[in-house]
Image (cartoon, helix red, strand yellow):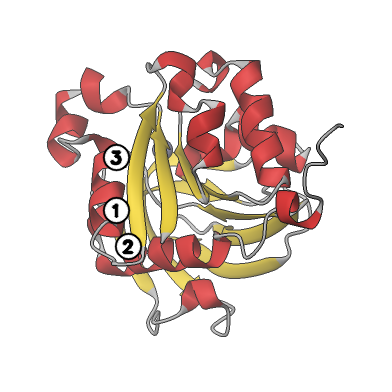
Amino acid sequence: MIRVTVWNEYIHEREYEGIRQVYPKGIHGCIGEFLGKNDDICVKYATLDMPEHGLTEEVLNETDVLIWWGHCAHDKVSDEVVERVKNHVLRGMGLIALHSAHHSKVMKTLLGTTLNLHWKHGDSEKLFCVNPAHPIAAGITEPIILENEEMYGEFFDIPKPDDEIFLGWFKSGQVFRSGVTFTRGMGKIFYFQPGHEEYPIYYQPQIQRIITNAVRWAAPYKKLDEVFPVIQEE
Ligand code: ZN
């Protein structure tokens, strides 16, 4: 069983009626719902307003893959929790950072660059798979059309990815490395651009397929504690 924790800052859905209508159970609720339909995946939730943002040592110890959605409150996430998440990734926990999570403290500390990009509100996107042999692209046979999506454009200031899996093309003429992977320590990281909060993107079956594939890909085969077992002091 792959144990997934879906973390969401969960602010836009509570503050804006239009966004609440798109995601009445929160973005985390939508993601957890489609992931939970798989027999091999079990889902827990954590949000910014919970004590320690819901990411205690105990919760992270029981998490194989952490999914992160954040946008307007990156600076409200405590450094202590960021450090804790980073350590768990280095020890083998998978991390999937969605959409505006590129600017989360967790991603910045793990990747080390600014993760800045160009952006523009109100665009539409065609998402191409540029690495069809990658497990995250399994079952994705056609380009994905996102009728409404915020434009994220190059240059995207990331370190050289392990793999580039999806390339986004926007009507306004921009392109973007929309699905990229990294390894930090024992942890696998997938950044996936689609998912602006105003649009029902996480309901699209192909998007759900990609995130589900990413969960299975990022789940640790082995954690660092198994490689270097904790030695008990006599
Ligand atoms: Zn957005």
Whether label 2 touches label 3, CB < 8 Å: no
Disc 2: which residue? 208
Decide: is 193 above or below 40: above
Name the element at disc 1.
helix
Answer left or right for 127 relative to 91: left
The quarter in which the C terminus is drawn is: top right
Q: Nearer the viewer, residue 180 or 57?
A: 57
Disc 1: which residue? 202
Mark 3 Cα shell of 10 Å, populated few (<14), some (14-19), many (≥20): many
Name the element at disc 3.
helix
Q: Nearer the viewer, residue 115 or 184?
A: 184
Can residue 116 be seen in the rendering of this structure? no
Looking at this view, name the residue that lies furthest to the right.
234
What residue sits 37% from the left and 16% below the top? Answer: 49
Q: CA distance from mark 1 to mark 2?
A: 6 Å
Whether label 1 touches label 2, CB < 8 Å: yes
What residue sits 65% from the left and 18% below the top? Answer: 80
Q: Give, as a three-letter code, the residue at label 3.
A: Ile
Label 1 or label 2, whichever comes before in sequence order: 1
Q: Nearer the viewer, residue 213 or 75?
A: 213
- Residue 165 point in image, percent of width and height: 58, 70
Disc 3: which residue? 27
